[in-house]
Image (tube, rainbow, N blue to C red):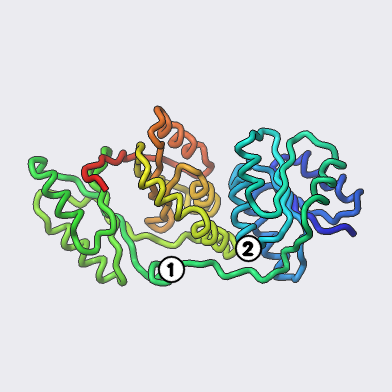
């Protein structure tokens, strides 16, 4: 046997053709239709002590695109040979893929012989190496967070009220918005009682009405999907979040009503949308709250909202555009 190959492609005919073709060439093949099923397969294989010698992944898939999978796989298995395949590639995508160690690129359509040649050009590697634990900040994991939405009743004191909330102890972020409310706050503390104290201080302020308070919850995800998201958060998303905050452009909060039975599929789909800066679960898994960026492109934000509304299990999407009152 030439080696074990894991294929990720959302087109059934391509999965079938690649599986048959590579099997005839002497490879053992497992094919997955999306990123989440591939994550499950990689983790099950590791637990069984069964290594993969190659990963072949499409770029454009319904849940997690191949470049994002590539980032996490390379973080866990740096030497694993990965071949990125696509029928909609361009030079930018090719260069992004090839920038990763021991990674090849192949445009569709191609013959099985082209695929075998591309695999053989990569250096040998396996998935049986020790995978590092997902890195995360223990203090942040143990902290308690909650979102508060506020309406300003005394509009003549709007800036004074905003400044007071912005500087209040326990408030991690304070954004003026245009939507169903005027200000959205993220409170962070080491315990629920401290969060309650923050809430009491906000509620006691004159000239405002607290519309809602929702504690941030850890999404109920399968263990390996949760670990994958944690790794991607550290490897890619955290830097992208900081960059989005620095770049000029349109920023908006989103409040997404969802079917809690579909939370894993919805959360992972929303989390991996490039324009989503962050995404949190609130209200017993019935809502997501997050921030999106349009980077100043005209009409960009409405397209993102439309994309969110098309996700199965999403019931409603509300947007609150951020109004920048204080320069960083």
- Determine whether, in the image, residue 232 is placed left or right of residue 143: right
Secondary structure at badge 1 equals loop
Q: Position of residue 203 (x, y in %)?
A: 16, 57
The picture quadrant where one finds residue 81 is bottom right
Q: Position of residue 219 (x, y in %)?
A: 47, 59
Q: Position of residue 122 (x, y in %)?
A: 77, 52
Callout 1–callout 2 Cβ contact below 8 Å: no
- Above-or-below relation of 297 to 134: above
Q: Residue at x 26, y 38 (%)?
A: 178
Q: Residue at x 9, y 44 (%)?
A: 157
- Determine whether, in the image, residue 260 is placed left or right of residue 164: right
Q: Is residue 278 visible?
A: yes
- Determine whether, in the image, residue 174 is placed left or right of residue 310: left
Please identify the quadrant where the N terminus is shown. bottom right
Residue to which mark 1 is pinned: 137
Closest to the observer: 260 or 39?
A: 39
Q: Residue at x 67, y 62 (%)?
A: 77
Count of marks overlaid on the render: 2
Closest to the observer: 86 or 202?
A: 86
Secondary structure at badge 2 equals helix
Q: Residues within 10 Å of mark 1 (few under 14, many from 20)?
A: few
Q: Earlier in the sequence, mark 1 or mark 2?
A: 2
- Above-or-below relation of 223 to 26: below
Q: Residues within 10 Å of mark 2 (few under 14, many from 20)?
A: some
Q: Residue at x 62, y 52 (%)?
A: 69
The dot on residue 44 is none
Q: Is residue 181 visible?
A: no
Q: Position of residue 46 (x, y in %)?
A: 71, 67
Residue to which mark 2 is pinned: 76
């Amino acid at each position: 046997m030439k080696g074990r190959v894991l294929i990720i492609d959302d087109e059934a005919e391509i999965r079938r053709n690649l599986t048959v073709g590579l099997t005839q060439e002497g490879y053992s093949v497992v094919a997955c239709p999306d990123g989440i099923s591939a994550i499950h397969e990689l983790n099950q294989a590791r637990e069984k002590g069964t290594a993969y010698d190659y990963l072949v992944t499409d770029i454009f898939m319904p849940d997690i695109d191949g470049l994002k999978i590539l980032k996490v796989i390379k973080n866990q298995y740096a030497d694993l040979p990965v071949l990125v395949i696509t029928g909609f590639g361009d030079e930018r995508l090719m260069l992004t893929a090839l920038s990763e160690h021991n990674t090849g690129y192949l445009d569709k359509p191609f013959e099985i012989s082209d695929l075998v040649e591309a695999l053989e050009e990569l250096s040998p590697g396996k998935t049986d190496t020790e995978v590092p634990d997902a890195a995360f900040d223990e203090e942040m994991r143990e902290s308690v967070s909650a979102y508060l939405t506020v309406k300003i009743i005394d509009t003549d004191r709007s800036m004074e009220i905003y400044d007071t909330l912005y500087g209040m102890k326990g408030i991690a972020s304070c954004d003026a918005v245009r939507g169903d409310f005027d200000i959205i706050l993220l409170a962070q503390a080491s315990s629920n009682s401290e969060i309650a104290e923050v809430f009491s201080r906000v509620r006691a302020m004159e000239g405002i009405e607290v519309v809602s308070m929702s504690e941030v919850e850890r999404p109920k995800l399968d263990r390996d999907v949760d670990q994958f998201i944690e790794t991607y958060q550290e490897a890619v998303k955290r830097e992208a979040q900081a960059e989005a905050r620095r770049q000029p452009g349109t920023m908006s909060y989103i409040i997404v009503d969802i079917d809690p039975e579909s939370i894993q599929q919805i959360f992972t789909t929303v989390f991996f949308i490039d324009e989503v800066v962050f995404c949190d679960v609130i209200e017993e898994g019935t809502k997501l709250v997050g921030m999106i960026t349009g980077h100043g492109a005209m009409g960009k934000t409405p397209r993102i909202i439309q994309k969110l509304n098309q996700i199965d299990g999403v019931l409603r999407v509300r947007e609150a555009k951020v109004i920048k009152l204080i320069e960083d």
